[in-house]
Amino acid sequence: MTLTVFIRYQIDPFQREAFADYARRWSTIIPSCGGALDGYWMPHEGTNNIAFGLISFDSLAHYEAYRSRLKADQAGAANFRLAEEKRLILAEERTFLRRLE
């Protein structure tokens, strides 16, 4: 069963480009830690402070292993720190979805 983590970000609308850079850095970090990055989506028209990220895993066990590797990853830790220091993300929600076959 494929498990997809759907992340809804409330971002600072005045820091959209900084958030885009943050999201782009995950394109190498997430796969190196075992996740399949389905992508990030940024505001384009309408609401200017909501972004999304989707990451897929083979199972919940694979997700848990990924989280452990991500916590130990230097590039991942640096990216998290940068987002906190710049206050790019105002709120974050995670929903775990399964793909219907």
Image (spheres, rainbow, N blue to C red):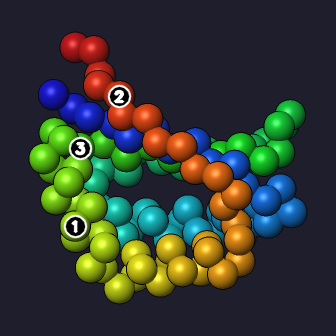
CA neighbours of label 3 inside 10 A, class few (<14), some (14 to 19), many (20+): many
Element under disc 3: strand
Closer to viewer: mark 1 or mark 3: 1
Q: Earlier in the sequence, mark 2 or mark 1?
A: 1
The residue carrying mark 2 is: 97
Which amino acid does the dot numbered 2 rest on?
Leu
Q: Secondary structure at mark 1?
A: helix
- Residue extending farthest top: 101
Q: Residue at x 30, y 69 (%)?
A: 70
Q: On the rendered structure, is 73 left or right of 11?
A: left
- What amino acid does circle 1 point to? Ser
Foreground disc of the pair 3, 2: 2
**Residue depicted at x 13% and y 47%:** 61
Three-letter residue code for mark 3: Phe
In which quadrant of the rendered view does residue 97 lie? top left
Which of disc 3 and disc 1 is earlier in sequence?
A: 3
Is there a contact, CB below 8 Å, between mark 3 and mark 2?
Answer: no
Q: Which mark is residue 68?
A: 1
Residue 68 position within the rendered picture, expressed as x and y whole percent measured from the top left: 22, 67
Residue bearing mark 3: 57
Q: Quadrant of residue 5?
A: top left
Give whichever of 101, 76 is nearer the camera: 76
